[in-house]
Image (cartoon, rainbow, N blue to C red):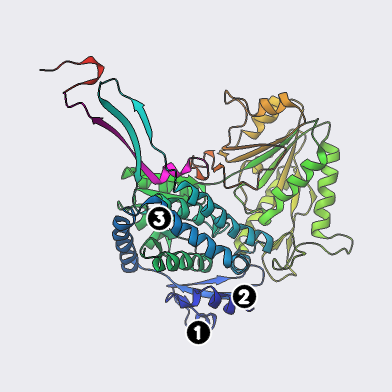
Amino acid sequence: MTSIELLQTLGVTNDPRFVAPAAIGKNARRDIVASENPATGEVLGGVRLDDAEAYERTVSRLAAGFRAWRSVPAPTRGQVVRAIGEEIRTHRQALGRLVTLEVGKILAEGVGEIQEIVDIADLAVGLSRQLPGMTMPSERAGHRLMEQWLPLGPVGVITAFNFPAAVWGWNAMLAAVCGDTVLWKPSLLAPLTAMACNAIASRVATEMGHPDVFGLVIGSDAEIGERLIADRRFPLISATGSCRMGRRVASVVGQRLGRTLLELGGNNAVIVHEDADVSLAAQSIVFGAIGTAGQRCTTTRRLIVHENVAESLREKLCTAYEQVIGVNGAAGRIGDPTSERTLVGPLISGEAVKMFERAVAQADKERGQVLVGGRAITDLGGHFVQPTIVLSPKTNDLPIAMEETFAPILYVFTYTNLDEAIAMQNSVDQGLSSAIFTEGLRVSERFLAPDGSGSDCGIANVNCGTSGAEIGGAFGGEKDTGGGRESGSDSWKAYMRRQTTAINAKGTFALAQGIVFG
């Protein structure tokens, strides 16, 4: 199936904003953005960007839709989400392939990302029948004191290129069962995936009698993004992206006293203690460091390993990296992300490759030693780089490691004392994901210390890596990661408003705190 046939199958070509690849070359315009396959440079298609007028039409439609949708019983809303999940499941392979073509994830990860939407839809369906409230004893005789959770309003969802489908799913499926309508602003690096997913959700909801629940605006930050975050019709803006972007969103939304749910950068570390299963640690680190070509927010970027096992772990990692890269004439595992053999696809753009090269050069200036990798790959036709391991100098001083570079670079440090390792892990600005490998109960409990002195991240794993979160647990991080929580647990509360209610069934006037009036 060609890329254009894939887009036709998923209904993308039916969107009036879609521009065929041939038309882009003939009519290059500022209001059209081209989506390119980062593995080949092929133009998959173009999108005619929305302007202020198109934005207003969509928002007005969703605002009106909210007034109807919030009155639909939550279990019925759940059935709509269930049907959307089933339709996504039906198109899982095609959607996964589109993710692979548009952002360069290997096919297994592309399909896995679509599976996340199916999974969160399943969770949301269950939630639709148990959105809880709390009843509390009142100090006033004949009174009932309770809380209820109510739909919040239209929700704005801003997503990044690296998870062009799943993050929308996390937000949209939960928001929908909570009674909210959803406006999606995707990354301009992955607009076609957004068009496909939103088309399915909108079509299913409309066929079930509930139009105007899901909407999509595709536009620049200046024209659409700024307008969205300043729009008082959106009580919640959920934004995934860089820390710089998050600060802007938080500032603008905060000025109008709206809510934000921020999922920003991560500079994640794995600690490997001297009693760890080194083979298990190595497998987890390799996936965490090179999965999605190092372009996950949960990518393992720093390895902090006890000096007693540092050499053996480095040997295992270097061997694995060399197998991936391909040395001494051996075939590597970098290349076409649609091939089942490939483990590492491309970076998203040429600029991302330049950032990788700048980071490696800076590490060299700081006396970091490149153990394996370190180069861009120029003979594959796309934006490919070698997964890279950089050993910190003996002083454990490598300032570039304090920065998040969206590329497969792993910085390696050693330690002698566990408290030292935890302090090193916590020394970066972000606090998303963390992990420790140990066979010791006391060591793991120190890492998960209930007084908060262990890992300062929103995710803290023992004997599993920094990547690969499940939808059942709340996903998010602290510090410059933004403090937001998406997906499972009680993250649904972000999409609702809480109301405390007192009911007087006795018919006599009574005040709390024993106050007598009159």
Under mark 2, the amino acid is Glu
Tell me what residue is drawn at x 72 percent, y 34 percent.
396
**Magenta includes 139?**
no
| Image quadrant in which you'd find residue 324 | bottom right
Circle 3: residue type: Thr
Query: Which residue shows up at 54% across the image and 40% down it?
Result: 477
Where residue 107 sits: x, y (%)?
67, 64
| Structural distance between the alpha carbons of marks 2 and 3 | 43 Å
Q: Residue at x 54, y 42 (%)?
A: 476
Q: Which residue is mark 1?
A: 26
Read off the residue under disc 3. Answer: 76
Residue 286 image point, x, y percent:
75, 49
Q: Secondary structure at mark 2?
A: loop
The disc, 1 or 3, on the residue closer to the chain's N-terminal end is: 1
Which contiguous range is marked in magenta?
489-508
Q: Earlier in the sequence, mark 2 or mark 3?
A: 2
* Distance of label 2 from label 1 (alpha carbons): 16 Å
Q: Earlier in the sequence, mark 2 or mark 1?
A: 1
Q: Is residue 495 above or below residue 448?
A: below
Q: Is residue 417 left or right of residue 122?
A: right
Amino acid on which the number 1 mark rests in the picture: Lys
Q: Quadrant of the N terminus?
A: bottom right
Q: Is residue 392 visible?
A: yes
Residue 504 sits inside the magenta stretch? yes
Expressed as whole percent of the image width and height from the top left, the position of residue 88 reads 54, 63
Mark 2 = which residue?
42
In the figure, 117 relative to 472: above or below? Answer: below
